[in-house]
Image (spheres, helix red, strand yellow):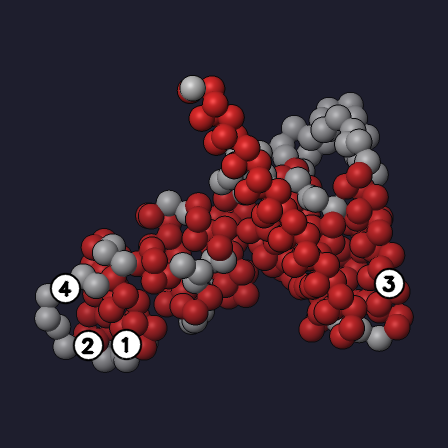
Amino acid sequence: MLNSHQNQDQNQDQNQDQTQDQTQAQSQRQQEAALGAALDATARAWLRTALAHARSAAAAVPPPAPATRPGLDPAPGRRPRPVDPWELSFSAAGRHLGPEHADTGRVLLLLAAAADLTTLTRLYHRGTADERRAVLLALPRLGTPEPAAALPLVEDALRTNDTRLVAAALGPYAAAHLTPHAWRHAVLKCLFTGVPLAAVDGLARRARGDTELARMLDHYAAERTAAGRPVPPDLTHALALTGVAVPSKEV
């Protein structure tokens, strides 16, 4: 009887995984079609070729990993790995698709290539700020061996003062995997640097009942008030989301 229940649970998990994969594949096709419709013929042809290269790389048997650190340093005595054509396209997307569509194009390339953690780490650390942003935006839609394995990339972005990277880092992946301590400080970083809290995925859910976040926000509001500086509306909004009563202060 126990085995029967276990088999049912396994079948349900498999069905859920299959449904999720099918939904994601359909969303990816729709996004590719929408991007293609927004491009001129030359850019559309370039994208089609780049995606084909990415899918070919995903279907190929991967060679043994030559890195001592994921995606970075070749092991001693080994030649650097050849760069896949789709990775060159990832870097060149801005030139071919324009700044308006480069993020979407790069994310679609990462999805088509089923980029693993080693590849994501390499592209992030060797890429421009725009390329790093695309890696961060793709994280919620890419699988990793451990769910939180790509957190070092998010944490690196949150240490920068590039507001576009900070905003990209605080998507659904960060909402799901950042520790409470790191997440609270990320919220404060947004307030310090002027990143709208609308960029913080799951803000209402994670803020609710967070006494420590309420304390930190209240302290920051008091500091600004004491210095004669206005309190950002986002701060007041985040404090209200916690639902935590704080000592009455003029804010």
Residue 31 drawn at (x, y percent): 69, 63
Q: Are marks 1 and 2 in contact (CB under 8 Å)?
A: yes
Q: How far across and how far down the image is residue 188, in percent?
A: 35, 61
Q: Amino acid at mark 3?
A: Trp
Which residue has dot 1 on it? 231
Q: CA distance from mark 1 to mark 2?
A: 7 Å
In this rendering, the label closer to the viewer, 4 or 1: 4
Among the two numbered marks 4 and 2 on one chain, the one whose residue lies closer to the N terminus: 4
Q: Quadrant of residue 29?
A: bottom right
For mark 3, what is the residue? 46
Q: Who comes first in sequence, dot 1 or dot 3?
A: 3
The image quadrant of residue 106 is: bottom right
Tell me the CA gap for discs 4 and 1.
18 Å
Q: Amino acid at mark 2?
A: Val
Q: Is mark 4 in CB contact (under 8 Å) with mark 1? A: no
Q: Mark 4 or mark 3: name the one nearer the start of the chain.
A: 3
Q: Which residue is mark 4?
A: 245
Type of amino acid at the residue the image marks with label 4: Ala
Q: Are circles 4 and 3 on residues that touch, CB within 8 Å?
A: no
User: Which amino acid, mark 1?
Assistant: Val
Badge number at residue 251: 2
